[in-house]
Image: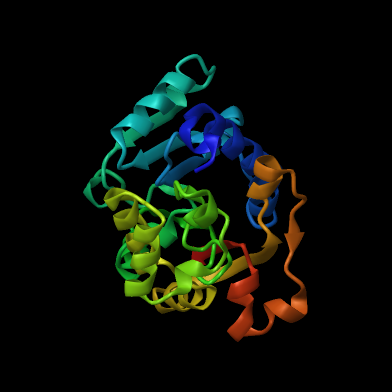
Amino acid sequence: MQKRHLDPLQYINEQAYTTQKYILPFIRQVRKIESEMQVLEIGCGEAGNLKPFLDLGCICTGVDFSVLKIETAKTFYKDHPNVSKLKLISDDIYNTKEFDHQFDLIILRDVIEHIHDQDKFLRLMKNLMAPDGIAFFAFPPWQNPFGGHQQVCESKVLSHLPYFHLLPVSLYQSVLKIFGESPAKIETLLEIKETGISLERFEQLAIKNGYKMEERILYFINPNYEVKFGLKPRILYKFVASIRCIRNYFATCGYYLISVK
């Protein structure tokens, strides 16, 4: 596990940096971002992705399971000049009944690959979006070198070992045990193995549930890696991106914008 995984303030700043530099321009290809725009982030964690939108005067809402992460976010934003436009909720998005076709923009960054029953979730999301709303998704396809999120392993070997999350469940679990991962960490990694999603599955579920693909970029080097590792983002070569059977193994991230048809 890297030191950055233990520092929530570093996460906030990393999220805000990448959102400001890469995600805002991507969204602006399709939709103008204006003051008073209603923005929802689902699985917001410490809500670093919302900072660039709050800086612009958007009305921002963040929802996350974790009470601790939401409290950390509230502390971080307490002196922000637009804090009155920020609402942070610790809850399951399925329990938030007050939202009805409210949001102009919904953000899920590194979240959809953790959601059980993604089909059900995409059906729900339509009820949260304004009639002309859009949704931004960023996620690592399951088959990419670190699609199992093994970088969070305590073992230095496993945290740097690509593709081993693709092993059959029983063998994968055995490897984690042999290298000394805790039962809680193993449970978390097995859950990620269960919910991991490919580019094709995401696109199929979106179309099935009545969404239109507005824009897509597949990255060979994830924009997150710039602030984490000093690597310049690289878009996946078009030739590789066009081959369904291999692109998931080389794309470290997919950016999508979808809207309701």
Q: Nearer the viewer, residue 80 or 104?
A: 80
Inspect this view and state whether residue 3 appears: yes
Residue 21 at x, y percent in the picture: 71, 42
- The image shows residue 15, relative to residue 210, as above or below, that is above
Q: Residue at x 39, y 74 (%)?
A: 209
Q: In the drawing, does residue 232 fall left or right of residue 167?
A: right
Residue 101 at x, y percent in the picture: 36, 52
Q: Residue at x 52, y 18 (%)?
A: 80
- The image shows residue 85, relative to residue 130, as above or below, that is above
- The image shows residue 95, relative to residue 201, as above or below, that is above
Residue 261 at x, y percent in the picture: 48, 71
Which residue ends up furthest to the top in the rendered image? 79
Q: Residue at x 58, y 66 (%)?
A: 145
Residue 250 at x, y percent in the picture: 65, 71
Q: Report which quarter residue 4 is drawn in.
A: top right
Q: Nearer the viewer, residue 12 or 177?
A: 177
Q: Residue at x 53, y 49 (%)?
A: 156
